[in-house]
Each structure stands twice: as structure tokens, then as C-alpha cells.
Image (cartoon, grey):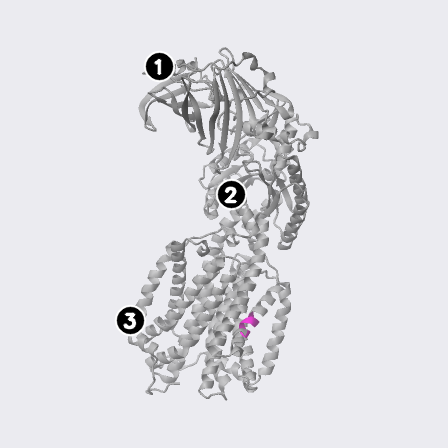
Amino acid sequence: MRTFVPLFCSVTISFSQSGLDIAQKLDNKERPQSVFSRISMVLTNSKNKSRENILLSKSNNIGKNQIIWVLKPKADRGISFLRKEYEDKDNEIRMWLPAFNKIRRINSNRMNDSFMGSDLSYEDLNSRALSDNDYDRLNDELFNGIDCYILNVISKPELKSAYSKHTLWVSKKNLTILKEQSFGKNDELKKVKIYSYKMVKSYELVSKILVQDIQKNHKTEIYIDYISINTDVDSELFRESSLKRIPRL
Amino acid sequence: MIAEGSKYQESRISKIVLDNPLKSIFIPIFLTFIIGSGLRFIIVDDNMMAMLPTKMESRMTWDAVQNEFGSTESIFVAFGNEGENIFNKEALSQLWDVTRKLEKIKEVEKVTSISNIPKIFSNDGFLEIEDLQKNRELSEHTIEDIANYVNANSAIKNRMVSKYEDYFNIIIQPSPNVPHDILRHRVVQVGDSLLSRNYDIHYGGIAYITGSVPTMIKKDISTLIIIGLGLMCGVLVLNIRNIFSVFLIFSIIIQSLIVMAGVMGWITYYTGSKYFYFTIINSSMPIILLTIANSDGVHFVTRFFKEMRSGKVTRQAISASIDKLLMPIFLTSITTIAAFLALYFAPINQLLGYGVCLSIGILYAFILSVTFLPAAISFKKWNLESISISKESILEKTIRNIGVVIIPNPLKILKTGLIIILFGFSGLMFVKVDVNIANFFKKGTEFRKSIDFIDEQMAGTMDFRVRVEGDVKDPGVLYEIEQLQKALKENPSINATYSIADAVKQMHFTLMDNNPEFNTIPKNGNKISNLLAMYSMSGDGDDLDSVVDYNYNISLITALSSMMSTDQIISFVEHIHSHVNDLEIIDSVSVTGMGVVIRDLIYLVIESSIISLVASLFCICFITSLFFKSIAWGILSIIPLLSAIIINFGLMGFSGIYLSHVTALLSSVIIGVGVDFSIHYIYHFKANRSKGKSDKNSTEIFNEVGYPIVLDSASNMSFGALIFSNFIPVQFVGGLMVFAMFATSMGTLTLLASLTEILKKKQIL
């Protein structure tokens, strides 16, 4: 029951009339079982200064399990993250710090922390459960000349989230999310995400994401440099021990 | 002398002016309005940095630091009650409110206080960061935790809590290019509205000082200038004994001032050049132009009365005054203009705009003196029996009597003058320079108390910044940064230092379960990188903005200090440079901060003063030599002002009056006014000789030009009212102004008069 899968795997959508119907269609849209990708992440601060991270990501189970290794910058090479999503308990994120030889479990109350100093929080990396939110369909709009559904995804009060709601621009033609605005607990606009896609085999997968933190005037550009889908990614990989071994591309 | 009814051959200019009096009055007034309308384009710039040339090392470093780390000129707001512990529920709630309200001010880039800084702690063996004060309302237990954390972190405590824990300090960083006076106003508004009821508040910091002082000085000087003008008016009325004439002299002064300010506005509007912004240096321009324009008017009016007293025909008297004064006033104007344009060679860029605008004001005063003034005089029906025309004033008679004493004893007068000059010369070596505007205030004044409080109880107002280029993930670089910090701390005036090395050490210590053995820089670069990566995940990315750039390649060491004297600043900067030279791993280090800026300004003020003095003296000597066709006359023309400058600076040396960018204006006043006096004297000396009056030449010259010179000086002495200023250097200017006027007029009437007399007797002239 997911509305969209983790950012570094793919984003898929479906079509319907009401807000909930659109969300369900998005959730049901077919997506790859496993993804192996190389990602460039360019962070730019308010003074227009940039730094780049190169990451390697492997996921399976439609993005429910994911492991990410840092390749660059050189001094951070080997820092890695293991993310596992569960239906019946809190999601789990672990981080490996090679220089200190330590593995850290990131608590659920730290989900708002930044992923590698980017504008994505750990919460942003996780999928959103369909049942955690309410859905409102707003008036349709054009985005970059593309006819879109506008969907308000409102966090239910019991949900532990840094956001009160998200507004999605969903392409009517492809049922892909083109833009997302995320609002904080006081309904202030916190982040804007813009997505670009490319066709890989029969899937329309994210090729670029621009994330802007409106309040900090900071942005993160994510480029998927290399992607390989539905290759054999063994479930055994998603263990702590794998954090310490960077695979070859 | 023109006998009544005798035929007087009018010059062309006299004829044009007197035949077209209405045009001669209204065209200048119209021009004044047109040019003066540029006033609205004047941009006031309170940024002291504008005075430093953009290619100077400390300025380049300063600009780079502002670009990479944001403004380093902060405002401090300290509040509390003496003797009462500030770590209490109410004070922390107030701190929370003020911090958040200050953050909402659009001119504010960043606010730092205990209520919004991060707390680094270890959780399950890992580094975590959260807000030190999470809520407005706090329990006693949480307050104790906050106090304990602050007390354990000296880098935080030194900056944000007073020595005796009875005051909190809030640090406000301005947004880029925000005028400090506006920022200061907004901050004080918030601080006073929220805190003044229950707490004692102290404001400080460079941005607060630079945002307050120029406005306060302008207000203070404006009031005192009005008083000075009133006194000047009184002196002129008492001596000229005709209100209409004094009104005309003031018309010239006011119109010249309007045109000077208007030109400044128009040039700013059309060129956008920052050299034409109105800075603290420019605040001396009105006084200088006032004295020069006054001189032109006084010479003309006194000459007119003299001619009336002898010729008794208004048109002829005006015409004779124009003809006799056109050339000397023109010559005094172009020499003064040349002297001020010589400021082009001064290293303080703002002096170019200063010189150009002042020159235009001087030129306009000249034009008004030979058009507007005579035309306006021609409109009045003059009563020949009035006291102003029929009788000499007391001052005029006194000058005549002094002349009788001086002229027959030129050698004695010269020797006495030389002894005074030698005495003044020996005082030159004691002249000290101080440009620190915090020292503009006497100890004990409200403003100074606040600065002293920040200096004594907090980290201090003055800052030194060391910009380091080198990969901070390299342990060697961090180690050298740490060593540099230690060297900075050796100075007893330094109250706090902080850098990325402190942050990394704290992260290391926290990650290793607060084990003091790890309160060090990790020896492995990857560890440093992992610590920084961890911080970037859990903390706010902006937290380290003030100590390291985004790519971890450029870092900033900050040292905050109490106010230092000029000598202390110079030796401390040398001390920093000597340590910088010992570094081996760091690629490049440059030093800046308000301390260094003050040091460089000191050099610039000295350099500018010397260059402008030498260049202007040369220009004056050159022009007068050319005009009088003799180098001897050229040299003689600068002797009175050169001697006045020596005596003036000598007096400054002996009396402990320091040279600053404010007191430096005295040399300009001396040159501007002094050259007028000597040229008038020489012109009349030569004019009378050419008429074959060589026998009684000097006594006559003394009588002719002595009175306007002394009257001009006496009226300019009215600016001695500046002695009642609230600012120390302005008080000095007031006192020195009186002395400078005395020195320049006496220099002409004693030294120049006796020298010309001696040289004449020896048939050298």
C-alpha cells in the first residue's frame, strides 16, 4: 500500500477521478522489482556554492529494501545506509561510518534529519503508506504545458511526520508526478520537488529530481547517471555486513 | 581710490553685471535650484570599508570573507540585571521571544543566541544535534541542563553569556548590503519594546557603532553648525554693521552649499560611483566650503565699503571692487580647487568625490561673488552717512594699528614667527593617529558605557578575522588553525576565539562519549570527514557557515577583543603575521576584521594627509608662480599656510589631540582659507607696486587686506562652537579651528608681510 516508491528507485502513478482514486492508481502502477543505479547528488547553498556526492544504490522488493554507498567525495567514501520498510513496524535506517568503525541506527524520531546534508530527509526517502494520508483532488492545472491532476496528500494526525501535507502535480497522460510541494506543520511551504523522467525498458523512471528547501534557500539536484532494472539483487544483500562492502558497478 | 564724480573706466565684466543686474541675480538662483535638485539623489553610506581601496589586501580579504561567510559586522544585544543569575525561566522565555522577533527583521541574516543554537550530544555512541532550547517554556530541570551545557562549552559561553552569568547576549548578523543605521534602528526597536521593562539592556558591536555614530555625528554637527553660523553672523554684523550685506554673504554660502550637495547627487545619479556617496568623511565638506565662500563674500563686501568710503558712488564702488577682486578671488579659487582636486592622488577613494564636489562648490562661490553679489548690492540705495560706510569698524582700526607695529620691524617679527614654527615642528613627532570610532566617546557617556560593558562582560566589540585556505578535512590544516588560535589568545585583550577546529574537536569529544582524551583534532582525515558528514545530516547546514565554507576549503578564525589602542592594534596584527609566516601546511592565510581595517585606515589617513598636503602645496605654488611670473612669489604664497599647518599639527602633538579621518579636515581648511589670505596679500602688494607706491607699500597693503583677512578669520572662528560637541574628535576640530584661523591669518600678516618687506628692501622682489 504505497503511493510512490523511494526516490532513487522510481516514481510511478495511476489515474482516477477522486483524490483517493488517483492515489490508489499511483500506488498500483507497475514498477521494477529491483534497481541498481549510480546517482550524482549536487548540493547548492544560498550563496550558490556547490558540492557533489556520488552514490551507488541497490534496491529490491519494489524499493522496500535499499542500500546506498557513498563513492565521492573521497574522504567520505564508504559511508553507507541501509533502509528497510516494514508493514507492521517502524521502518529501519542504519548508517555505517567507516572511519570510526561504527554502525548507527537512525531512530524514528530522527526521520527529519538530512540525508548526507541534502534537502532530502530520511522521511523523504521512505514511501508513504496510502492509509497514512487523506487525499483531496483540487482543480486541474497545466505544469510546463502538461495537463495535470492536482492532489493534496494530507497527513493524518496520528502520523509521525514533519509535514502537514503535500501537493502533487500528476501528469494526466503518464500518471507521473511532475512536481510536489511539501508543507510544514504550520502549513508553511518547506520544499518543492521537480521530477524528470526517462523510459527504461517499459518503465517510466525518474532521471532527475530538483529539491528546493524554500526556507533555507538550499537546493539539491539528483541525477541518475546509470540505471539497471530487474537485475538479480539478492535479499541477503540488505544486511548490516553489506554496508562495509562497496559493490562494483 | 575713486574720487566722487571722477570718471571710472569699468571693466567688461563689471559692465555686464551692472547693466544686467536682474539677470545676474536670477540666473544664479535658477542654476542653484536646478543643480540643487540633485540633492535627492545623495546616497548616505555609513560603511567604513568604503574608505579602503578595493585592491588593498585587508579589503580584498574582507570582501572575500563577507562573500563566503556573510557579514562579520554584528550587533550585540545584552540584557539582564546585574548580580541576578540569568539562567531562569522568565529570562529564557524573553530570550526566545526576542530571538524570534529579531529573526523576522528583513535586514537580519542570522540571529544567534542560546535560544536557537544547536546542542551536540552523544546518543548510542553517535553524534546527534538538536536545539539547545527546544521550547519557550522550560522546566527547572531543563534550565539546569542548558546552563550546564553552556558552562561546559567556553566558546559558547564567552559569546552568549556574561562573565558573571547575569546577562544573555544575542548576536545579530546583518543581511548583505544593509545600511547599518536602518538595521540598528530595527534591532533597538525590538530590543527596547520587549526587554526594557524588566531588564537592563546594552547594545554593541561594530554594526551598532557604525549604524549609530554617523547619524549621531551628523545630528550633533548640524546643530553646532547652526550655532556656528549664528555666531558667524553676529561677528559679521558687528564688524560690517550692515545686515543686508551679511545676508548677501550668507546667500553666497548657502547657494554654494546647495550646489555642492546637488552636484554630489547628480554625479551619483548619472555615474552610480560610490566615490560620490556621502560618507563620514564628507561631513566636513560643509564647514570647509562655508569658510571659503565666506572669505569670498567678506573680501568683496569690505572692499565695497572701502570704495564707498572713498568714492561714494555706488556703481563705481561696485565696479572698482569687481575689478580689484576679480583676479585675486579667481586665483584663490583656482588654487583652492587645484588643492582639492589633488586629493585624486590620495589613497582613500572617497576623497576624489570629496575634492570634485568641493571644487565645484568653490567655483560656484566665486561666480556668485562676482555676479550675484555685486548685482544685489547695486539694487540697494546706500546711505552714505550710515555708520557702515562712513566709519571704520573697531577691528579695522585695530588692524591698522597692528600694521604700524609689524611693518617697521620685519626681522623681529620673522624671527619670532620662525621660533614658533620650530616649536610647532618639534611637536609633529608626537602626533598620534586614531580612527577607532568607539574612541569618539568620552568614558562615562551612555554610548561608551554600552561599548565598555560588551568589552568587559562579553567577548568584546572589536574583531580580527583570519581567512585560511586549505582543506579542513586535512588534520594538518586543522592543527595549524588551532595553533594560530592559540597565538591569538596570547593577547590579553582577546576574550574569545572560534574556528572550525573547535567545532571538530567538540564533535570528536562528543562522539567518543565525552571522553576528554578525545577533545582533540582526529589524526585521520577520514574521521574529520565522517564527523562533518554526520553533522551535516543531523544539524542545520547553516550552523558551520560562520567558520567554514560549503566545500570545506576555506575557513575563518574569529578573535573577539576589547577595544585596543592604535599601537596595540598595530603590534597585534604584526604578531598575527609573524605566526602566519611559520605555517607550513596551510596554503594561504590573510588577516582582516575591524582591527585590521582600523590599522589600515590609520595608514591611509596618514598617507592621504601627506599626499594631499604635498600635492596641494605644489599645485598652489605652481599656479601662483605661473600667475605672478616668479617662483619666489609661488613659494611665498605657501609659506603662511605651510607654517600654519606645522604649528597646528605641532599643537596636536603636544596636546595629545589625535589625527583621525575627522581631525584631518583641519589641513584642508587651512589650505582652503590660508591660500586665500596669502594670494590677496601678494596680489595687492604687486598691484600697488605696479602703481609706483613702493614706499608705503606694505603698510598700505596691511591696511587694505588685513581687515578682510582678520574679519574672515574671526567669523570662521565661530566654528569653535564645535568644541561643545558630544564627540571627542569634533571637539578637537572646534578648538583647532579657532587656532587654525588665528595661525593662517597671522601667518599672512606677520610672516608673509615681514618676508615681503625684507625681500623688498633687499631688492629681491
Residue on which the image places disc 1: A21
**Can you give x and y, in whole percent of width and height, for residue B447 in the image?**
54, 50
| Mark 2: few/some/many CA within 10 Å (<14, 14-19, 20+) | few
Q: Give the CA distance from mark 3 to mark 1.
A: 89 Å
Residue at horizontal 32 percent and vertical 69 percent from the top: B25
Pointers 2 and 1 within a single chain = no
Mark linked to residue B67:
2
Residue A28 placed where, x, y %? 40, 13
Q: Quadrant of residue B82?
A: top right
- Residue type pointed to by label 1: Asp
- Residue wearing tag 3: B22
Q: Main secondary structure of the magenta part?
A: helix
Q: Is residue B144 above or below residue A236?
A: below
**Residue B643 sits inside the magenta stretch:** yes
Q: CA distance from mark 3 to mark 2?
A: 57 Å
Viewer-closest of B346 and A244: A244
B452 within the magenta span? no
